[in-house]
Amino acid sequence: MGDPLQLKDEGNKHFQAGEIDKAIECYSKAIKVGKDKKVLAVIYRNRSACYLKKESYANAASDASKAIDVDAADVKALFRRCQALEKLGKLDMAFKDVQRCATIEPKNKTFLETLRRLGAEIQAKLKTTFSTDSRVQNMFDILLDEELDKDKKEKAANNLIVLSREEAGAERIFQNNGVSLLLTMIETGKPEMILAAVRTLSGMCTGHKARAMAIVNMVGIDKMCSIMAVDNEEIALAACNLFQCINDSLTGGDKREYGKEEALVLDASKDLKTILLSLLEMVASKKVSGHGRDQALNLLSKNVPRKNKKEPDHSRTLFTIDYGLKKILKVCGQVPELPDQLPLTENTQLIASVLLNKLYDDLKCDPERDNFRDLCDAYIKSKIDPNDMDKTIHAVNTISGLLQGPFDVGNALIGHQGIMEMMVALCASEREVDQMVAVEALIHSSTKMSRASFIISNGVSLLKDIYKKTKNEKIKIRALVGLCKLGSAGGDDYSLRQFAEGSTEKLAKQCRKWLCNPQIDNKTRNWAIEGLAYLTNDADVKDDFVEDELAMKAMFELAKSKDKTILYAVACTLVNCTNSYEKKEIIPELVQLAKFSKQHVPEQHPKDKKDFIQKRVKRLLKAGVISALAVMVKADSSILTDQTKEMLSRVFLALSEDSKDRGVIVAQGGGKALIPLALEGTEAGKVKACHAIARIASISNPEIAFPGERVYEVVRPLVNLLHTDRDGTQNYEALRGLTNLAGFSEKLRVKIVKENALQDIENYMFEEHDEIRLAATECICNLVTCKDVQDRYLQDGNDRLKLLVLLCGEDDDKLQIASAGALAMLTAAQKKICTKMTLVTTQWMEILQRLCLHDNPMIQHRGLVIVYNLLNSDDNELAKKLIESEILEILSVIGKAEDNPTRQDSIEAARACLVKAMDLGLIKPFTSPS
């Protein structure tokens, strides 16, 4: 075959003569017969040069790589591979190769020139690749290409949505004919295309008034309404979000300065009015799907009533009442069982009731409320027709809707002559739908005890007859719930039982039976939960319910379902079972006075005592209540009212009372679920949720309890509990939670400082209550590694450092560990504090000696670390003063002690102090005489 070296030399001659093919042939033969790796590396490198000449760049790169595998510092091979990769368009890899060449031969001008050129090319390519214009065009090309696969289109859609959320990206999409292209995507009729387009439009409208107005005019409000009207929950929700983004931008979400033109160009009042009228049209339109109607009602509920009652302008509410109240009442009156009704979801009528309640609450004066009542009265009267039962039950169902919303308005209507008689007559009707609507109205009308007592005397026998005679399960269960509600009118007052002993337990047993029957439709089973929500005021019923694990699990599964109308009833049931409702403090003297004057005195049921409540809590946790609560919290805000949120917060707080149960709460997602409850809702509800978070944060690993970025959202709820108007338990739990977070990461410590918590934490260090003072000191101990906290201790004109030194002299071991730990870290981090601590109090030396002589190894170690920091502070006078005191003797005794595992840290710290003193020339090493 020949000698490889000879073949190599022959190949070189051919290469120099320009005979590239012959050179490749010689090199290839040499490779076949060659055994020596170094020789082969040279041959591969040479053949790589041939392939470069032939413009066979892939082969050139491959051969160069084989040479580099033998010798990684082969500059010729590296540069040839760089040239090949550049031609192949792999600029980043080529750049790395020439970078290595320039490192090996830093004075080689060819390498440096290539390095500079490739760097510039890479930057230019990146600019082109990532320039927004090309990205936008590229994404639209992919989305509108019929032949591309679904994954690529999905990725492009997601990228477009993300891009629209950046100001620069949104502007480029808008400028590059993006709105027209998005409309083309909507016209395809494909759900995924419509979703991507609507979500992109939402991003473009966010926070930019001028662009939002332009998009409203280009797309058209009617077009946006038609998108929201489709029978697709996801698309309806996305369109609702688009309307919300537009509304926010047009009503103050945009903070830009537009100058003189603003008044002329950006008058949004006409667009806002058109949107409001269009939404009101959607509410009562048959062309709108149930999901679309829900979202139209949600938008009205969120944007029409004032968010703050102190705002003077409530014209939107008055306008909505004048132009839309009858339309909303029409939704409330729909009876799905009748023909020719509006398309609805399970939640639509409850959302309408919530909207009515918000509108009524937003009115300022009696004439406005009278107008609201008169409009409702006129609507009801227009629907009552003795010759048309369908219209009449529509009127009764509308009253039910009002009773679930502005109760006083519904209650006044029921009091009108003939309404109650009509409801009673409907109960006796042969049509099952009439009975069902009438029974529901009776149930809703007995919310207040005064009304319940009227119906107890008039309607109990009627409901019992319906319950016994009807064979329709749906009516039977509603009649039963009516009886449940009337049976629980006395609340948890044991002495105010409405029915005979044992009756409520029988009713509850039947409710649980229906609840556990999967053959019955969900709406009917929901009514069983309504019944339990009332009956669980009775402690016997609570105990029976938590003993029935199947019933609990069935309720939790229904709470997780799409029908969210049941949330309030589930929350009521759980509040009752955990006894977490607001309890009035009973003052014994007043009880005696009430008995003496023969007034009614509420009595506690024996099963409402603490040990029974704890058992019920354990059973609820075992049945999986936390996972149900976590799903409930995510419900839409129009269904999950502030009152419901408060009840859920109360339940969470009751469930977290025992520290042993908090691990279960964390494991099932309770930590994350509490965060939104702590940030939104009633003031009482937010405080309860904050308290529950504090309990979890105080003993759990924050990374597990509040995963990801959520852990930073926990800080503010905890800081809110530090306010002086909160009770001592809440202050203590919050301090414990902040201590745990502060010990977790520097980022969390900075977040705590930014939330202005330090002042409150420091104030609690002066607290007389030992536990609160300890918790505050431990929190500061974990925060002192933060630079901002150290700076506070360096400031003059305050007693922070003095307090910390004095706390080291207290008799409480835990307090000494925390305060001495904080002082040890401060003196190690800031040498100026070493000198300052000797000036803030004359007792510093005595306290330091006590720390160094302490029986507790942890306290002693901290004291000795402080001594070392003082010796290491560059203050020679201070070091001299320490060594001239009794500290030297203490250090000598501890340092000479035999090694001891329990005190080893202290012994080594003392020895380090002695070594430091010797380094400073303050003491001399002991030498024995020769």
Image: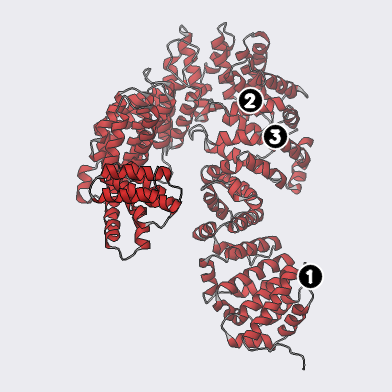
Q: CA distance from mark 1 to mark 2?
A: 65 Å
Q: How many residues crowd mark 1 within 10 Å: few (<14), some (14–19), many (20+)?
A: few
Q: Who's the residue at 54% across and 11% down the image? A: 433
Under mark 1, the amino acid is: Asn
Q: Nearer the viewer, residue 57 or 730?
A: 57
Q: CA distance from mark 3 to mark 1?
A: 50 Å
Kindly state the secondary structure of the residue where label 2 is placed. helix
Q: Earlier in the sequence, mark 3 or mark 2?
A: 2
Q: Earlier in the sequence, mark 1 or mark 2?
A: 2
Q: Who's the residue at 31% across and 47% down the image? A: 84
Q: What residue occupies the far front of the structure in this picture?
A: 2
Picture coordinates of residue 740 (x, y %)? 62, 56
Residue receiving disc 3? 620
Kindly state the secondary structure of the residue where label 1 is placed. loop
Under mark 2, the amino acid is: Ile
Tell me where residue 774 sits by quadrant.
bottom right
Q: Is residue 197 visible?
A: yes
Labelled pair 3, 1 in contact (Cβ < 8 Å): no
Residue receiving disc 1? 900
Residue receiving disc 2? 529
Q: Nearer the viewer, residue 382 or 157?
A: 157
Q: CA distance from mark 3 to mark 2?
A: 16 Å
Left/right placement of residue 867 relative to residue 33 reads right
